[in-house]
Each structure stands twice: as C-alpha cells, then as structure tokens.
Image (tube, rainbow, N blue to C red):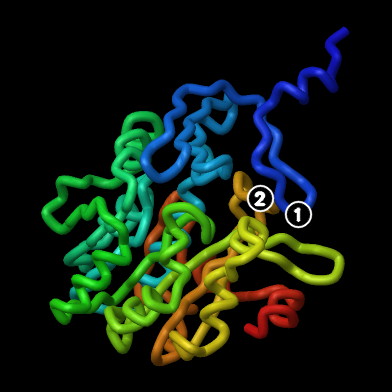
Amino acid sequence: MTDAKSDFANWWHEEPQMGFTHALDMKLLHREQSPFQLIEVYDHAEFGRVLVLDGLIQASQADEFIYHEMAVHVPVLGRERKNLNALIIGGGDGGLLRELLVHDHVSEVVMAEIDRRVIEISNEYLAVNGDYDDPRVTLVCDDAANYVAEALDQGKQFDLIFLDITEPVGPSASLFKQAFLDKLVAVLADDGVCIDSDSIFVGRDKIRFLQETSSEEEKGLLEIMRSGNFFPHVAGYRSIVPMYPGAEFGFFLYTKDAFDYRHPFRELTGKHYNAAVHTAAFALPTWWRTQLGF
C-alpha cells in the first residue's frame, strides 16, 4: 500500500500564504536564476505546463486563458474607442499580448518586461504568447519605471495600462513606489484605465491580498490606489482562477473619470469571456462591497 503522506511530502508546494499552500504533483522541466528572479517551469498531468517565479505560480496552460481574457476584454470592450493604444507592464508569459491582438481597433501595444528570460522561457515551454512580430507590437526589455519615465518625457499617453507584475519584492519593488506611480498617472490618458489584479484570501475576520502577504513591509497596489493620492476612482470586478491561491481573483480599474466599464459595446466570445460574463463579473458579493467599499 502506498504511503500517501510520503507521496504528498514529495509534491511541489507553493510558498505558504495565509497558513495554506498549493500542493501539486509536478515534474520540473526547467529551472534557472535570471538576473532578476528564479524562473521555473513544471509539468502537471492535468494542468499542463506551469510557470513559477520566485516560488509563486504565474500561469498554467490549463487556466491561463481565464485571467488573460478577463484582464483584457473587460477594459477593451467596456468603452468604445476607435484606435486604442495599450501598455503592458510585465506580462512576460505573453498572454495579455495575445488577447489584445485579437482586437482590430487596438493600434499599438507596448510591452515593458524587465526579464527577457521570462519571455523566452514562456515562449518555449508554455506557448500561450501573442505574436511579438505583429507590427503593432513594441517589446521593451527594461525596467518599466525607465520606460514610463521616457514615455512621459516624450509626451506619450496610453488608453490602457496593464499592471501584470509580480509581488512588491524583487524586480517589481520599484513599481510600488510614489515616484513611479506619479509618472504612471501622467502617462494614462484622461479617459484611460489602468488595470491591476490580485489573488484574494477570504479570512474569518478580514480579507487579504497576495501582494500584502508576500511582503511584510510593502503595501499592495490596491491599498495604495484606494488612498486617492494617485487615481481618484477605483472600481472592481471578479473571476475565479483555480491555479491562483484561494482561486478568488480580483481585477481593479483605476481611472481619472470614473467611467463605468460594466457593459461591453460589442460581442466577443472567447474560451472564457463573453458579454454575459463581462457584465456579471461586476456583480460583487456582499463581502466585497463591505470590505473593499465597491
């Protein structure tokens, strides 16, 4: 008879968060320390390839489409624009890029990812990326803080900005600082939207976010944005992403004009996304409204 305890002890475990952890029976395919972070790719019999950065799951082939479709199609289709330009900060697995390029009215996508090796390894092992050779795409392998400063100096602004970044430690630490966030506000168009997201842990007394539990010293972006010191308006919508801790996942829309993104201006059917799911994602549970004030 197999010793179940012994078997589980040999499974991969995500770094513990809030007193619990993922445990997955996975095989390591690739591991390397880049100049910025530990990059690992595993293979799971049911979930396929799994990308892990510094011990935390970033994407799996099984359910990455849920996160990427909901992150992109809600803000893209929630407000009608003729020519939309977007900035992805992070996004090394390429899934956000893939979904943005679905839309003909997206005229430009700049992707600023600090770690070229995340892009290369994701392309090789996950193959969920968009087309980096699309003429609408500009890939910048540099600290996003540097790119945003340069864009500001050039007077450039974006309709959509996606913050697809890791927790407030390591290569993303500078992106949680006032100096960067002031510039981020400036490069977002007055009618634009900045999209952030995070895993949500439902506790007995309060809710917590992965960004909060990953660093004892740093605040998560939602808490920073809710201060009102940067973007004056915050709205939220939700989805379930099974491979993220707790599965409950929140998307946060930071705007200057408080535009309502609940209603898509045209239909689109993705693997997960559709118009009904779009609208329903804004139907927030009472505990969301009570504890987050949405």
At label 1, the amino acid type is Met
Task: Residue 187: give x, y in percent of width and height.
Answer: 27, 79
Pick whichever of labels 1 and 2 is earlier in the sequence: 1
Among the 4 quarters of the image, the one containing residue 140 = bottom left
Residue placed most toward the observer, 110 or 282:
110
Q: Mark 1 touching mark 2, by CB under 8 A?
A: yes
The answer to whether 189 appears left or right of 30 in the picture is left
Could you tell me which secondary element the residue under label 1 belongs to?
loop
Q: Nearer the viewer, mark 1 or mark 2?
A: 1
Split into 4 quadrants, where in the image is the N terminus? top right
For disc 2, the marked residue is: 245
Could you tell me which secondary element the residue under label 2 belongs to?
loop
Q: Dot 2: within a 10 Å radius of its alpha carbon, few (fewer than 14), some, or many (20 or more) residues?
A: many
The answer to whether 248 appears left or right of 147 in the picture is right
For the point 57% across and 62% down, the residue is 198
For disc 1, the marked residue is: 18
The answer to whether 211 appears left or right of 231 in the picture is right
At label 2, the amino acid type is Pro
Task: Residue 166: give x, y in percent of width and height.
Answer: 49, 55
